[in-house]
Image (cartoon, helix red, strand yellow):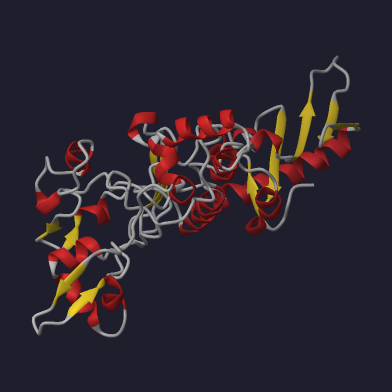
Amino acid sequence: MPPTNLDDVDIDQATSCNNYETAATISMAWNGIDQIRAGNPSAPSQLKWNKVSCTKKGKYQYPRFSCNVNGQMIVMGKKQFQDCRAKMIASCQQMEPNMCPCYDTKTLFSNFEALNQHKIDPGKSCKVDSPMAIAISPNFGGTKAMCSFNSSNKWCMNTSGQTMDITSTQLDKCESVMEESCEALDVPTCYDERDYKFEGKTRKNCQWAALEYADGKKRRCNRMDRQDKTYVYEHCRWTCNACECQDMPQFYLGNDRTKDCDYFNTLKNSNKAEDRQQFEKYRQIPAVSRSCPITCKSGCCMDNPKFKFTTSNGKVFSCGDVASGSNTDLCVQRNVGRHCKAACGNCQ
């Protein structure tokens, strides 16, 4: 029978409790959060959902009264059917105010099933502040689902962009579903901030920095924003090749989950010349070189080992000296912040 504790389950909205008071068939599908987490959330069709339905057919149709439990039909008499239907209606009445009306985990996973980390908009997705959202980059349609946690204005948004007001109980469920979905998705940590504007100037965004970077120059990436004392590369990490110096474990090329950093590393170290040649071709793809900087020996957010500078008292320091002791205040000097990215704590 339907679950009694809704805290540990998620309900499939598309097939559950539709017009349950008048419909000839009442259906309900649910899955335990633990089962969803343990399954393959990137392929929701592979998840096994618990399904229950009760159906009343026409007077001369057989069977007139039946229930179906996980694909197994049970033929029953009128009194048994009435009892089962009453329990289903009671369950739907209990579930309705406790469901997130905008989405469920199955809906979100289905919408984002074909996505990899390059299609998800990391600047707008799975942030802990309100509203919490999963968003797709505008280049891939801009579909998004949101859940607001503002106690004075509770609402949620579905994947079609429609919003609706919700109760506190529904809000809790929306939050739970969103958190479960975010745990399952590969949201990249290295990305360009889409809304960034250098010193508040509309045209000076990460695309502005990329124009110069494409010519082999890094001056714009290394400029300090005088408004907040941060560097352009801190906001445009993907463009400025300022990602963390580690191969991203969640990266894979396109929709092929076999082509991750380990795969490219295997090609690089292969005894076969054709494999190594293939690696060199993959290495030229920006998504590969930036996501697998250790394997590709490409640029990343690190200190310049050759950089030296002289302090006001005549001492010669390196980035190693900046990282130790109480010398991090030197990072406000522009040349130091440009060359000692890791020592100044600007690689997070």
Q: Is residue 253 above or below residue 152?
A: above
Q: Is residue 276 left or right of residue 226?
A: right
Residue 119 seen by the camera: no
The number of numbered badges drawn on the structure is 0
In this view, the residue in front, 88 or 40, is 40
In this view, the residue in front, 117 or 69, is 117
Rendering coords of residue 263 (x, y %): 59, 40
Rendering coords of residue 137 (x, y %): 36, 36
Q: Is residue 101 left or right of residue 289?
A: right
In this view, the residue in front, 177 or 315, is 315
Q: Is residue 268 above or below residue 223?
A: above
Q: Is residue 239 left or right of residue 203?
A: right
Rendering coords of residue 13 (x, y %): 59, 38
Residue 266 seen by the camera: yes
Which quarter of the rendered picture does the C terminus lie within?
bottom left
Which residue does the image show at 19% across and 61% down from the upper left? 230
Rendering coords of residue 198 (x, y %): 14, 50
In this view, the residue in front, 244 or 121, is 244
* Residue 4 figure quarter: bottom right
Which residue does the image show at 19% across and 58% down from the upper left? 231
